[in-house]
Image (spheres, helix red, strand yellow):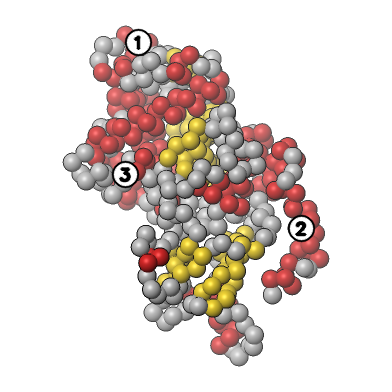
């Protein structure tokens, strides 16, 4: 069935047109990806993003438990002026602890995107320190069960080195899953810095770069539901969320000052942005980009059936650490024999594997399908119940 679908004239034409995406020169590849995504982006506010992810209540609890975490950080945040990070006049004149939060940071001697990326790296470490101090005495967690990002991910600085296993990607900062190699299969979140603040449209060059990253993540990670990319441009921070249908710009707010003499209102707004950023960094992958927890890797998946044993209602999860020791391997599949298929920048996507399932050969298809469509497994079951022969089980 798979071979017949992929051998239709339309499929052959599309495969031939897009097959170079894996090997093409950088500009050609990005131009093709940009062409597929152009006109399919829109803005979304942070509250709406939380609503779509079902995280409004969790964020409310997180915000309450961290309301004092970032106050001194926001007050001592530098200003980004003329493509350099500089101490604000009020901080330089201050004589309290907040003035020393960023003292001696290397980003003060850097310029352009290097200064922005170095500030971000220093900032997330200080934010995490603040959260760890707040979580002390609470079993290492904050209200709502959130944890500092260091408990979930590792950071890689890729400003001057390529992400292993990628198409020569040099993202500024990458958050990796902790128990895996540093390559595209273990990328949780990418951060990209731009020295000029983007007013209005995100711009063709920047979108091409971010879209190229997300396309490589879709190819490398079969359990993805969406791909987020953090973008800091000037003093502003946002998260760009790529789904298979659209991409969304979600503004988080100002993450540093835009002028040397700031208003105290600016401090409150920067603190709000820090809270939003830390919340996103504290989310486990099954809540922010995957349909199951993949921090231990996703070489195996275990499928749990509903009460009626329906395959259409089966749910997948990463196996527990001791699952491999179980004598009963029913429902456990190993994702080691992938069937090569083209991965397009937008639209339907399927990762297909030859697997052993319930002690027999099977084909596993992890596919991204529009939510208003009937699941493929449900269609097969409907046809089988109707008496149609040779339906895949």
In front here: 103 or 297? 297
* Image position, residue 21 (x, y; %): 71, 48
Dot 1 or dot 3, earlier in sequence = 1
Report whether 172 appears left or right of 25.
Answer: left
Mark 1 lies on residue = 92
What number of labels is visible?
Answer: 3
The answer to whether residue 311 is left or right of residue 391 is left
User: Which of pointers 1 and 3 indicates the residue nearer the eye?
Assistant: 3
* Residue linked to disc 3: 147
2 or 3: mark nearer the eye: 3
Q: Residue at x 40, y 75 (%)?
A: 328
Locate residue 173 relative to residue 347 in the image: left or right: left
Residue ID for mark 2: 14
Helix, strand, or loop for circle 3? loop
* Residue 205 screen position, x and y as percent: 66, 33
Label 3: how many Cα within 10 Å (few below 14, some 14–19, many 20+): many
């Amino acid at each position: 069935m798979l071979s017949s679908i992929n051998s239709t004239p339309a499929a052959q034409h599309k495969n031939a047109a897009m097959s170079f995406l894996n090997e093409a020169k950088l500009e050609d590849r990005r131009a093709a990806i940009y062409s597929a995504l152009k006109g399919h982006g829109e803005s979304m506010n942070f509250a709406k993003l939380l609503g779509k992810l079902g995280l409004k209540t969790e964020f409310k609890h997180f915000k309450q438990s961290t309301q004092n975490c970032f106050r001194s950080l926001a007050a001592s945040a530098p200003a980004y002026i003329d493509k350099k990070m500089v101490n604000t006049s009020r901080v330089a004149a201050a004589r309290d602890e907040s003035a020393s939060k960023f003292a001696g940071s290397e980003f003060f001697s850097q310029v352009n995107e290097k200064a922005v990326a170095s500030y971000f790296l220093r900032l997330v470490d200080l934010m995490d320190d603040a959260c760890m101090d707040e979580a002390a005495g609470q079993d290492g967690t904050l209200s709502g069960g959130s944890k500092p990002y260091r408990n979930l991910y590792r950071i890689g600085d890729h400003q001057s080195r390529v992400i292993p296993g990628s198409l020569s990607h040099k993202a500024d900062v990458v958050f990796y899953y902790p128990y895996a190699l540093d390559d595209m299969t273990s990328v949780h979140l990418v951060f990209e810095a731009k020295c000029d603040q983007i007013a209005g449209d995100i711009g063709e060059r920047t979108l091409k770069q971010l879209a190229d990253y997300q396309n490589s993540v879709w190819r490398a990670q079969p359990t993805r539901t969406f791909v987020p990319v953090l973008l800091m441009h000037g003093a502003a921070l946002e998260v760009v969320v790529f789904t298979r249908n659209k991409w969304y710009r979600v503004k988080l707010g100002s993450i540093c000052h835009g002028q040397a003499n700031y208003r105290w209102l600016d401090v409150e707004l920067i603190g709000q942005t820090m809270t939003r950023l830390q919340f996103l960094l504290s989310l486990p992958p099954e809540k922010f980009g995957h349909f199951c927890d993949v921090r231990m890797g996703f070489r195996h998946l275990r499928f749990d059936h509903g009460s009626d044993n329906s395959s259409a209602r089966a749910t997948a999860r990463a196996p527990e650490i001791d699952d491999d020791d179980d004598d009963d391997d029913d429902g456990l599949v190993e994702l080691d024999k992938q069937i090569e298929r083209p991965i397009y920048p937008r639209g339907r996507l399927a990762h297909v594997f030859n697997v052993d399932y319930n002690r027999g050969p099977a084909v596993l298809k992890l596919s991204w399908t529009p939510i208003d469509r009937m699941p493929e497994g449900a269609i097969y079951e409907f046809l089988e119940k109707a008496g149609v022969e040779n339906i895949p089980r």
